[in-house]
Image (cartoon, grey):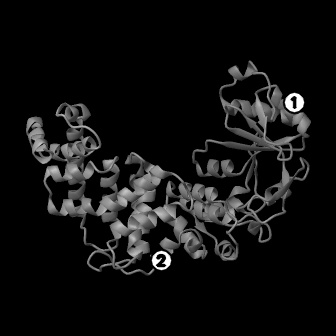
Amino acid sequence: MTFRPYNRIMEKIKDRNILIQRIATDIAKERGRAYFVGGYVRDLLLKRESKDIDIEVHGLSSEKLEAILSNYTNYDLLGKSFGIYSLRYHRIDIALPRKEKKIGVKHNDFRIDVDPYIGTYASSLRRDFTINALMMDVLTKEIIDHFNGLKDLENKEIRHINDMTFPEDPLRVLRAARFSATLDFKIAKETIDLSKKIDLSFLAKERVLTETDKALLGLSPASYFYALKDMKQLSFFYPELEKMIGLEQAKTYHDEDAFDHVMLVVEEAAKYKDLAMMPRYFMYAALFHDIGKISQGQRHTIIGQAIAKEALERFTNEKYLIKYVQKAIALHMDVLNMYKDKSKDAKIIRLLDKFKYPKDLLLLALCDIKGRKSNYYSDEMIDDYILWAKKSLKIYEEFKDRPHLGGRDILALGYRGPIVKKILARARYLEAAIQDEKEVLKIIRKEFP
């Protein structure tokens, strides 16, 4: 780790593009070359926002590079053997070229050799996909494309670079699927075929969760799961989802199997996630909302909660995520039933009051309605549901903003101990139907003598 005094010049160079140009100019003066590399080049060509910038410096020793960087900003050296300099406050990583050699079974078991003089071909050969191996000279903007990445970028295709090195990192299988979701690209057949043969058993659960998170928040999240299905890798991480493939549903409501229905719902959820209060949780709820259907013969909204919990606990200990998903599974059908029945306001309030994020619950039900191939829900019905959902949310928010009976009110009646919590729950239930506080208290006295 390298710590250097805060340089005053940093105060003047607030624009990181100016900082990069000055550093690259000094590198060129020392007969080195600075290249933008990796996802930054890909996103730049796709005109997508990229928060982080990766730069690779060729033809310059680590000592000379450190001397140049020290003139401009503070940096952290992420291990001498990695040769990566992270520029603080700027989200810029500057690295020296390196080679990687597999030395173990885990996805990160590599020996890394830093070599500033190996050249652009050898350096980019270690990368995963052709579209991520593109390089761009920082000063001249010249594109270096050793593996036809520009063609694959134009054709919206994800293709691995090397048959020998690609399987060395099993995480690349998930990355291929994830890029398919986040970029809405197809995966080349040869990459799918190769991915079928790769053992993923040594991947850390945290890495699986990270890739799934990114996919679910991408442009086409269903592509991630379809890609894993095509690669014969879905069962390894999500056996519950694989069990939904070919699982028939009631023909009155569905023309697709359970897996395709879930994927359609996930795609709809991607359109609405930015309206949800908890977008990431919302996407997982969409993914698992019907998971209980794999236990045929039982009510899927009940058994699904236990199945989703077991599935999520393989990757995360986030109890709030798990509880959110379980609650959404339990309640999403109640929303649809209340819409069909045109339930009274009090009943709607009581339902929405069970979920901490009622707007998310209403949105999930909408995605469930839209995520199917049948015409059971016509466009008119969908529009009608949206109006009903907006009205229901407004009714609930008005209820929530009203003054409500609290613990002090119950204590004032003379109640003590654990029963107070039970009485408060009952009072909240009654308040949904009765706006008269005195009347609610009368009922409480009768029910809890």
Mark 2 residue element: loop
Image position of 9 (left or right of 345) = right
Q: Label 1 amino acid? A: Ala
User: Residue 397: where, in percent of width, then height?
Assistant: 24, 41
User: Residue 364: where, in percent of width, then height?
Assistant: 34, 57
**Residue 139, quarter of picture:** top right
Out of 309 and 187, give the one closest to the viewer. Answer: 309
Image position of 70 (left or right of 19) = right
Residue found at x 37% / y 77%? 256
Of the 4 image quadrants, the one containing the C terminus is top left
Image position of 355 (left or right of 140) = left
> What residue did someone put label 2 on?
243
Whether 4 is drawn above or below 444: the answer is above
Q: Is residue 387 visible?
A: no
Of circles 1 and 2, which is in front? 2
User: Residue 306: where, in percent of width, then height?
Assistant: 42, 65
Count of numbered badges drawn on the protein: 2
Whether 222 is drawn above or below 439: the answer is below
Q: Is residue 296 visible?
A: yes
Disc assigned to residue 67: 1
Out of 223 and 210, give the one closest to the viewer. Answer: 210
- CA gap between label 1 and label 2 equals 58 Å
